[in-house]
Image: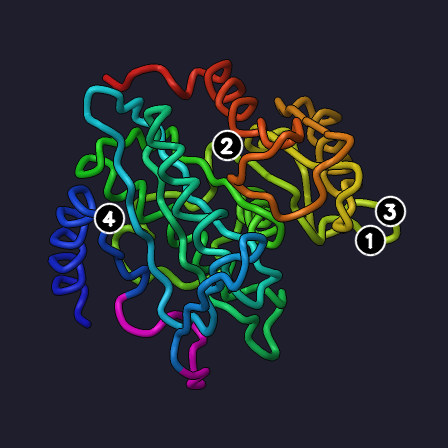
Amino acid sequence: MPRLSFALALTFAVALAARGADPIKLWPGKAPGETKDIGAETLTEPKNPNDVKRLANVSEPTITVYSPPKDKNTGAAVVVAPGGGYHILAIEHEGSAVCEWLNTIGVTGVLLKYRVPKRAAQTPDNLAMVQDAQRAITLVRSMSKELGVDPAKVGMLGFSAGGHLTACTALTKKRMYEPVDKSDEQFGHVPNFAVLVYPAYLTEAGKLKSEFEVTKDAPPMFFAHSSDDPVTSEGSVALYLALTKNKVPAELHLYAKGGHGYGMRKSASPCATWPDRAADWMKTRGLLEMGK
C-alpha cells in the first residue's frame, strides 16, 4: 500500500478505535520478514474456568485502542503484550481485560496482537515480536493527538513471554526493522516506562542474560512476581538489581504464593493486588496526573 494511502487508512482506523476499539494494522502490507503462510488465525475458547482464551497463528499484527473517558484521561498510554510462551496469546485475561482496567485509572490501553509463533531462522529468535512491539510504541506516539495521549507517557506492560518482550523492547535502543513511513522517522520506539508481570526468559544459569544491556538511560520499571512461580522469579530480581545498580527507578513486588499466569484474575492471594500496586507506582511516577 502506498504511504499516503496507508496514512489515510490509519487516520480512519484511529477515529474508529477511539470510539469502538477496532483493530489497527501495524504495517502497510506484510509485516517485515513474512514469507510463509502459517495458516489461518484461530481463537480457542476456554474449556474450563482455569483455562484461557488462546489466539494462535498470528501473521497480521494489530493494535486495538481502549480509550478512557475524556474527563478521566491522564494522557498516559500503555501497550499491553499478552503472554503465551511465544506460541499463542492469552488475549483476554492478559490482554483486553488489562486494557479495560487501565481505562479505570485514566490510562489509554493499547492491546498488542503480536505475531506468534516464533518464526524460523531469526536472530534474535523473537525478532518478529520485537519488531511488532517497537512499531506499536512508534504508532501510538504518532497518533498521540488523535488518541489524547502524551507521547512522553507511553509505556508497555507484559506478562510472561510478553514480559520478556517488554524487557526486550525497553532495553533495545536499535530499531529492529527498516523505517516504513514517517512515523518511524519521527517517533521513537522505546517505551517511557515498563511494567513486567511474571516475566519469562530473563536469566540463564541464575544470571541476567547478556542481551539485556541495562544502562542509566533505561526506562523505569515495575515488577510483580511470585516466589512459587515455575517461571523463576530470579529474572525479575536480576533485572531489578541491574536497574537499581544503574540508578534507574525500579520497584519489585515479590509475593510468596501465586504461581504463574493469573493475569487479571481475582483471588485471595496477595498477588492478585498487583494492579493496585502498579497503579500506585504509576501515580508516584507522575503518570496519572491529568493531561493538559
Instruction: Name the N-terminal-most of marks 2 and 3.
Output: 2
Image quadrant in which you'd find residue 149: top left
Please provide percent x and percent y for residue 132. 43, 59
Identify the magenta region. 28-39
Badge 1 marks a residue whose secondary structure is strand
Q: Which residue is mark 2?
A: 193
Query: Could you give the CA–CA distance between mark 1 and mark 4, rounded to whole angstroms?
Result: 39 Å
- Relative placement, left or right, of 257 versus 104 is right
Kindly identify the amino acid type of the residue bearing the numbered disc 4.
Answer: Ala
- Relative placement, left or right, of 24 versus 152 is left
* Number of numbered tags placed on the structure image: 4
The residue positioned 44% from the left and 64% from the top of the image is 45
Residue contact at pointers 4 and 3, CB within 8 angstroms: no
The residue positioned 40% from the left and 33% from the top of the image is 101
The answer to whether residue 75 is above or below residue 25 is above
Badge 2 marks a residue whose secondary structure is loop
Instruction: Name the N-terminal-most of marks 4 and 3.
Output: 4
Q: Residues within 10 Å of mark 2 (few under 14, many from 20)?
A: many
Please provide percent x and percent y for residue 67. 26, 36
Q: Which residue is mark 4?
A: 21
Residue contact at pointers 1 and 3, CB within 8 angstroms: yes
Kindly identify the amino acid type of the residue bearing the numbered disc 1.
Answer: Glu
Q: Residues within 10 Å of mark 4 (few under 14, many from 20)?
A: some
